[in-house]
Amino acid sequence: MKPRSVREQVSAEEWAARVDLAACYRLVARMGWTDLIYTHISMRVPGPEHHFLINPYGLMFDEVTASSLVKVDLDGKIVMETPYSFNPAGFTIHSAVHAAREDALCVLHTHTAAGMAVAAQKGGLLPISQHAMRFYNRVSYHDYEGIALDLDERERLVADLGDTYAMILRNHGLLTCGRSVAEAFTIMFYLQKACEAQIAAMSSGAELAMVPPEVAEHAARQFERGGEKSANRPWEALLRTLDREDAGYRD
């Protein structure tokens, strides 16, 4: 008898989450935000169990599919049969956020050049571009402690994250979370753009034009009015692009 597919073994809600997460992996690859097979995006599985989905260790992001995602619990145990394993460093960071934040349904972590460059700067993200304004006093920081393999780092990481949706991991990279895959991806898109703009502006050697604090705060509040819904429109457009060019992520 033919073995049941992953789709046949999970709820409709979990399958929808798997498709969204697989799409996010493909989009991150298209954006050039990958670091070979490293870094991670995770998604909380809908339902009462504290399970989440993460990428199969060894696959490139443009190879990830809805069926290949690995389901694990907060103790790092794989809870659904799979031929794949997962990266323990990814488990440390992502399990910490998922356990501490009920609203963090999706967590996205990158090692981009611009993100690492800003993470290496003592002043962090500066209010010098419109993209950066949405993070004014709304981005957190976590000091580097080495490769994220030590489980006791989780407590310090989530304490530093607080109630923010964007974090700069000093000397490491960027992290965003959201109430949906769409929101986590959109926040990362703008955080990445803000970092790219900062590095480009600083590399010119010209004096930087700093926005007054009251204006930066006003702009940040303007961005907040859009809420989670502001992520859905670009996300739907991105999915249409993926479906036109390669819908294999849905497998």
Image (cartoon, grey):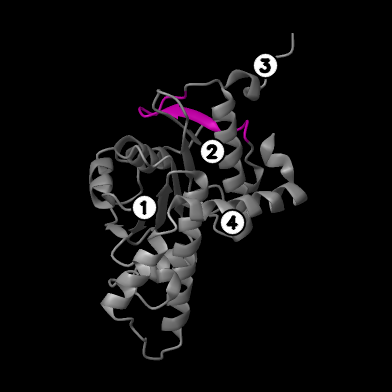
Give the dominant element type of the magenta stretch: helix, strand or loop: loop
* Disc 4: which residue: 234
Examine the rendered structure and indicate whether residue 170 appears above or below residue 12: below
The circle drawn on residue 57 is 2
- How far across and how far down the image is residue 247, in percent? 73, 43
Secondary element under disc 2, as helix, strand or loop, is: loop
4 or 1: mark nearer the eye: 4
Q: CA distance from mark 4 to mark 2?
A: 29 Å
Secondary element under disc 4, as helix, strand or loop, is: helix
Q: Amino acid at mark 1?
A: Tyr
Examine the rendered structure and indicate whether residue 123 appears above or below residue 3: below
105 in magenta: no
> What span is in magenta?
66-78
* Disc 1: which residue: 165
* Disc 3: which residue: 4
Q: Residues within 10 Å of mark 2 (few under 14, many from 20)?
A: some
- Residue in the image at 27% along x and 45% along y: 158
